[in-house]
Image: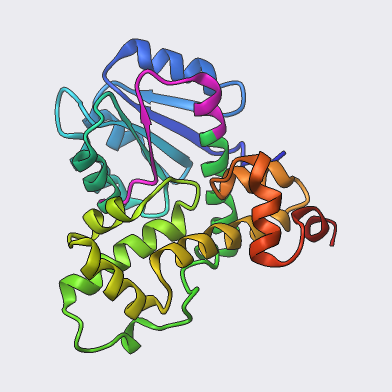
């Protein structure tokens, strides 16, 4: 079972006392939990000791998106998970553009929340120990300065935003429609420029990112195959077969090495 750094606290920013209490009850069995009832207090409570933030998008004193922006400006490496009772795709896309790592819909399941937090805290730990992002972002081995010069800046930024989202959130379900909307362009343009910039189709890049993350998890002695499946966003039932098809070796065999 994967183990996150239990010295780090989880900060819950939500104006609903019932939600704060429920999340604290679920998470405090495994983590230190700090809560804030509004955005202003939440921003003050973020520190170097914060391992993850659970942030409600609807707050009484300010927009959750603005709180997210301030947190990411001061502590860019701290993962932020959005809590929302709304199913608006546009709101979630804006949050991801601002640096959110995942989202939780109300009402939520306790086991789902705990597992999601464990995975994100674990990934954050791995990144901190290596002092850089887990080596997914350079799948194409291309430096930004070598990207085709004819591509407009807004197009490049849109593609790189999606690329960065995939690199940091391989467990998140993201399809072509969602990705192209995040990049701010139609599907045909997105597919064309994504391949030109990364050297891979969107689907191939997504698959490679998932299995690179899985390989990194399998190197950890505290992790197991189920952890690798969860972190890469695969159903554990089908993970081993998909992993062998993509990587040429069974995850158990790689784990044993």
Query: Which residue is at the front of the view, 12 or 238?
Result: 238
Please provide percent x and percent y for residue 256.
85, 57
Please provide percent x and percent y for residue 79.
42, 46
**Residue 173 appears anywhere in the view:** yes
Q: Is residue 101 magenta?
A: yes
Please provide percent x and percent y for residue 47.
40, 42
Query: Which residue is at the front of the view, 115 or 197?
Result: 197
Query: Which residue is at the front of the view, 116 or 26?
Result: 116
Q: Quadrant of residue 218?
A: bottom right
Q: Is residue 193 left or right of residue 201?
A: left
In the image, residue 11 above or below residue 211: above
**Residue 217 appears anywhere in the view:** no
**Residue at point 45%, 39% (across, down):** 52
Quadrant where the image shows the N terminus: top right
Q: Quadrant of residue 217?
A: bottom right
**Residue at point 38%, 56% (across, down):** 165
Q: Residue furthest right?
A: 256
**Residue at point 68%, 66% (across, down):** 247
Q: Residue furthest top?
A: 18
Q: Is residue 125 left or right of residue 3?
A: left
Please provide percent x and percent y for residue 144.
34, 81
Q: Is residue 193 magenta?
A: no
Quadrant where the image shows the C terminus: bottom right
| Figure coloring | rainbow
Q: Quadrant of residue 158?
A: bottom left
Q: Is residue 108 left or right of residue 234?
A: left
Number of marks drawn? 0
**Residue at point 75%, 55% (across, down):** 251
Query: Which residue is at the front of the view, 49 or 137?
Result: 137
What segment is highlighted magenta in the picture? 98-115
């Amino acid at each position: 079972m994967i183990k996150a750094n239990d010295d780090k606290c989880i900060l819950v920013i939500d104006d609903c006392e019932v939600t704060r209490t429920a999340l604290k009850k679920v998470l405090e069995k495994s983590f230190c939990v700090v809560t804030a009832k509004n955005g202003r207090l939440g921003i003050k409570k973020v520190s170097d000791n914060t391992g993850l933030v659970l942030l409600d998008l609807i707050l009484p004193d300010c927009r959750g998106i603005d709180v997210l922006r301030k947190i990411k400006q001061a502590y860019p490496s701290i993962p932020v998970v959005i809590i929302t009772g709304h199913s608006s795709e546009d709101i979630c896309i804006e949050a991801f553009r601002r640096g959110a790592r995942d989202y939780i819909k109300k009402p939520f399941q306790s086991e789902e929340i705990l597992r999601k937090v464990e995975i994100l805290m674990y990934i954050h730990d791995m990144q901190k120990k290596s002092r850089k992002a887990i080596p997914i972002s350079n799948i194409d081995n291309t430096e930004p300065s070598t990207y085709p010069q004819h591509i407009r800046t807004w197009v490049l930024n849109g593609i790189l935003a999606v690329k960065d989202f995939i690199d940091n959130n391989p467990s998140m379900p993201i399809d072509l429609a969602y990705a192209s909307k995040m990049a701010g362009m139609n599907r045909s343009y997105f597919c064309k420029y994504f391949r030109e910039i990364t050297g891979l189709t969107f689907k191939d890049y997504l698959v490679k990112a998932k299995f690179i993350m899985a390989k990194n998890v399998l190197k950890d002695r505290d992790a197991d195959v189920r952890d690798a499946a969860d972190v890469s966003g695969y159903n554990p039932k089908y993970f081993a077969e998909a992993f062998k098809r993509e990587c040429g070796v069974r995850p158990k065999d790689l784990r044993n090495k």
